[in-house]
Each structure stands twice: as structure tokens, then as C-alpha cells.
Image: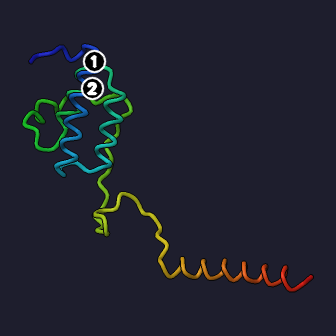
């Protein structure tokens, strides 16, 4: 269907592109960071042409060459691919410090020891 690329984007157009993004994310062809960036682009898009440019840049699309000259919505920055870091739940999106069980046990031991100390002081110093 030929549409005017300068026509205002309707909620149905936005839902169409959002559904495509969701489908690519579910199939594993799109990283979560790219999905979030795509959703931001859908929210910022004003015209149908901007939405079509977002959809055309999805992996595995046949019409990618047609959208080579298309302009993404204002403020849309394609995220830089992060190096793959395998973890227990797949590639990490950002570095998060994790507290080990041994550290949690030590903290628990210190807190409990302080509780016993306070109890002993209150109970025996009367």
C-alpha cells in the first residue's frame, strides 16, 4: 500500500511498527537495547515516513535498501553494539555489580552479632 510518507502517523501505524519490533525481539533477531531504542523512535515519530524508516531498518527486511535514504525521527540514535559478555541470563546489557552469597553471609553475620551485642548490653546492664 502506497502511503504519503509526509502523512501524520496514526495510532494504527505506531502499533504496526511496535508489533514488528516485538516480533523481532521475540524471535531473537533484535537486542533488547535496539528494541527499546525502536520504541523510543516510534514514540518520537511524527510522520508515516519516519515510522517506515524505523521498520525498514529491522534485521531481515527486504525493503532495507529502499529506506537507505529515509530519515529516522528526530532524536533517534541507533545504539552502539556492546561486546558480547555471556552470563547466566545471556549477554549483559550493562555492567551490574553482583553481591556474592559469601558477602551476604558476612553482612548477615555482622548484623546479627551487633543485634546480640545490643541485646546483651540491654539485658545484663540494668
Q: Quadrant of the C terminus?
A: bottom right
Alpha-carbon distance for marks 2 and 1? 6 Å
Q: Residue at x 18, y 44 (%)?
A: 24
Residue 92: % across, % down: 34, 62
Residue 122: % across, % down: 84, 79
**Residue identifier under label 1:** 10
Question: Is the residue 123 above or below the residue 41 in the image?
Answer: below
Residue 116: % across, % down: 73, 82
**Residue identifier under label 2:** 14
Quarter occupied by residue 51: top left
Residue 34: % across, % down: 29, 45
Question: Is the residue 106 above or below the residue 90 in the image?
Answer: below
Quarter occupied by residue 75: top left
Can you name the residue that lies furthest to the right here?
126
Q: Residues within 10 Å of mark 1 (few under 14, many from 20)?
A: few
Can you name the residue that lies furthest to the left here?
62
Which secondary structure lies at badge 1? loop
**Horizontal side of residue 125 vs 26, given as left or right:** right
Question: Is the residue 80 above or below the residue 126 in the image?
Answer: above
**Horizontal side of residue 44 vs 100, given as left or right:** left
Quarter occupied by residue 82: bottom left
Q: Residue at x 19, y 52 (%)?
A: 28
Q: Residue at x 18, y 40 (%)?
A: 58
**Horizontal side of residue 99 vs 63, given as left or right:** right
**Horizontal side of residue 39 vs 107, given as left or right:** left
Query: Along the line of sight, which residue is nearer the eye, 53 or 124?
Result: 124
Contact? badges 2 and 1 (CB < 8 Å) = yes
Amino acid at each position: 500500500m502506497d502511503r504519503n510518507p509526509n502523512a501524520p502517523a496514526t495510532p494504527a501505524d505506531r502499533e504496526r511498527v511496535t508489533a514488528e519490533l516485538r516480533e523481532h525481539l521475540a524471535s531473537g533477531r533484535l537486542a533488547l537495547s535496539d528494541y527499546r531504542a525502536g520504541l523510543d523512535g516510534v514514540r518520537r515519530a511524527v510522520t508515516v515516513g519516519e515510522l517506515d524508516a524505523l521498520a525498514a531498518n529491522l534485521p531481515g527486511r527486504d525493503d532495507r535498501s529502499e529506506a537507505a535514504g529515509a530519515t529516522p525521527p528526530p532524536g533517534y540514535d541507533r545504539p552502539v553494539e556492546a561486546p558480547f559478555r555471556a552470563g547466566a541470563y545471556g549477554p549483559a546489557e550493562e555492567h551490574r555489580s553482583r553481591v556474592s552469597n559469601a558477602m551476604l553471609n558476612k553482612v548477615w553475620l555482622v548484623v546479627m552479632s551487633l543485634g546480640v551485642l545490643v541485646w546483651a548490653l540491654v539485658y545484663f546492664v540494668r
